[in-house]
Amino acid sequence: MTADEYATLELQLGAKLVKVDGIWWRRVRPFFFRPLFCYETINSTPPTGSFSWPVVLQYAVQSTEKANSSLNYLILENLEGYHKSQLGRRRCQLLNQAAATFVVRPITEPGELKRGGYEAYISFYERTRYGYLKERRKRPAFERWVETIYNFGNPLVLGGYAGKKLNGVSVSYRVGDTVIYATLFIETDALKRNLGELMFHELRWRAAQEPGIRQVFLRPYQGGNSQDMYYLHRGAKLVRQPARLHVHPVLLVALKWLLPRRHAALVGNW
């Protein structure tokens, strides 16, 4: 997918995006924007006046001299030499146990995902109460989501099967030299039987086989919560990228004194 195609997909899924001078920005909070691809550096000063309202911007930069904050995120890199033995003895045991029950393979037809994926998503939602796109709890909305992701580019949709039953789904997209790990949901009993281990391994292995892939972008770092630690224990790298934060200095000082934890998260000092 091109950057514009991926942005169009995100817009179709409900993301708040705006394109300014060729750069796509995501609204992560009211009046607060970061680049859609937060791992890409911006060397010129973004034209804040080109937005139709006063905004706060934060973006990655190459030079630490320009930085007054950091953007922290998790990636997989050095993919070309990946082998499951790198995960250690215990992880390999979990993979082997999962492989004795499940098979992970691509889902190339939207009809297959519509038929089999809905029950796995409902089980995932009941366990996590995950709020993003929660309207997928209703089957028509779930099926519209499936149609949308297959209508843009060529997504890598992996399904984890026990026999004919679809127990887990992951969705990833390639944009340039990066695979964006976008979606994962797994039925609760299958999660207990380590299907998540097998699906994450399969994604990593397939990315390693794809020519020109430099990294897999997993997620923004959230301060070491359980999901962060899950990926870190499986070989993810925590990147602390120098960043520039455009915000009124009085507001930044006030935030530091009144809401120090929110200020720390904003500037990336987890």
Image (cartoon, rainbow, N blue to C red):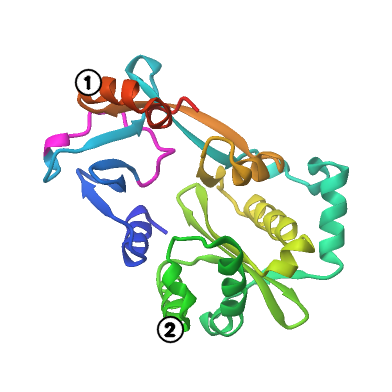
Q: Residue at x 31, y 45 (%)?
A: 29
- The residue at which mark 1 appears reads as 249
Residue placed most toward the observer, 237 or 105: 237
Is there any visible trace of residue 79 in the rendered image?
no
**Which portion, as a residue range, is magenta?**
36-49
User: x and y percent of residue 237 in the render?
Assistant: 61, 35
Q: Is residue 41 magenta?
A: yes
Quadrant location of residue 38? top left
User: x and y percent of residue 123 in the render?
Assistant: 62, 72
Query: From the viewer's perspective, is 236 left or right of 241?
Result: right
Name above or below for residue 48 compared with residue 132.
above
Residue placed most toward the observer, 265 or 112: 265
Q: Residue at x 83, y 54 (%)?
A: 94
Query: Residue most toward the top?
Result: 65
Question: Mark 1: few, some, or many residues within 10 Å (few <14, many ≥20)?
Answer: few
User: Helix, strand, or loop for circle 1?
Assistant: helix
User: x and y percent of residue 80 in the render?
Assistant: 68, 44
- The residue at which mark 2 appears reads as 140
Q: Is residue 110 magenta?
A: no
Residue placed most toward the observer, 112 or 165: 165
- N-terminal of the two: label 2 or label 1? 2
Name above or below for residue 145 compared with residue 183.
below
Instruction: Kindly identify the amino acid type of the residue bearing the numbered disc 2.
Output: Pro
Query: From the viewer's perspective, is 239 left or right of 11?
Result: right
User: Helix, strand, or loop for circle 2?
Assistant: helix
Instruction: Kindly identify the amino acid type of the residue bearing the numbered disc 1.
Output: Pro
Is there any visible trace of residue 161 in the rendered image?
yes
Q: Residue at x 49, y 55 (%)?
A: 174
Quadrant, the N terminus: bottom left
Q: CA distance from mark 2 to mark 1?
A: 47 Å
Residue placed most toward the observer, 59 or 21: 59
* Number of numbered discs on residues: 2
